[in-house]
Image (spheres, grey):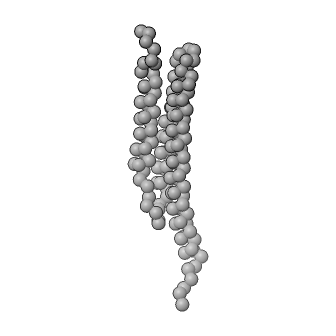
Amino acid sequence: MAKDPDRSELAVERTKYAEDRNIMAMERTFAGWIRTAFAAIGIGVAFRALFGELEPPWLAKAIATLFILAGAALAFSAQRRACRTLERLHPHSIERPSSPNFRLLAFAVMLGAGILIAGLWLLNDGSLSN
């Protein structure tokens, strides 16, 4: 007859599966934060496009810049949380995601946000006045 596993062996097995579930949940959470960062950046661009004629002229750029900076900050915060979580958890049955992948994506979002802000402030607004 096969020996039934005791309670402590079952608890260890459940803990391993729980860590795997937490890693997968962390990946979904990271994706959600990155989506939120893109949404904030999109709101900034849309605000500038819709309200570009506000007085004073720099006001629409400033508000758009705040939203874009918020998106960049969200991306940075998301990658820090994801990397800290990966340091604490150890996968058992799943392939662990790589921390550099989280950092690369977050820094690409932050670089894009920086380029977008520079474009907002440095490029011609389409006016022909000198």
Residue at x-position 40% and y-position 48%: 100
Residue at x-position 54% and y-position 55%: 25
- Quarter that holds the C terminus: top left
Instruction: Please determine whether, in this image, residue 100 is positioned above or below residue 14.
Output: above
Instruction: Please determine whether, in this image, residue 47 is positioned above or below residue 89.
Output: above
Q: Position of residue 48 (x, y in %)?
A: 53, 25
Residue at x-position 55% and y-position 27%: 47
Residue 70 visible? The answer is no
Q: Residue furthest bottom?
A: 1
The quarter of the picture where residue 4 lies is: bottom right
Q: Position of residue 70 (x, y in %)?
A: 53, 34
Comparing 112 with 104, the one in front is 112
Q: Position of residue 122 (x, y in %)?
A: 42, 21
- Quarter that holds the N terminus: bottom right
Q: Position of residue 82 (x, y in %)?
A: 49, 49
Drawn side of residue 7 relative to residue 83, left or right: right
Drawn side of residue 65 relative to residue 123, left or right: right
Q: Residue furthest top?
A: 130
Residue 79 visible? The answer is yes
Total count of labels:
0
Drawn side of residue 29 relative to residue 117, left or right: right
Instruction: Please determine whether, in this image, residue 35 is positioned above or below residue 115.
Output: below
Instruction: Please determine whether, in this image, residue 43 is positioned above or below residue 80.
Output: above
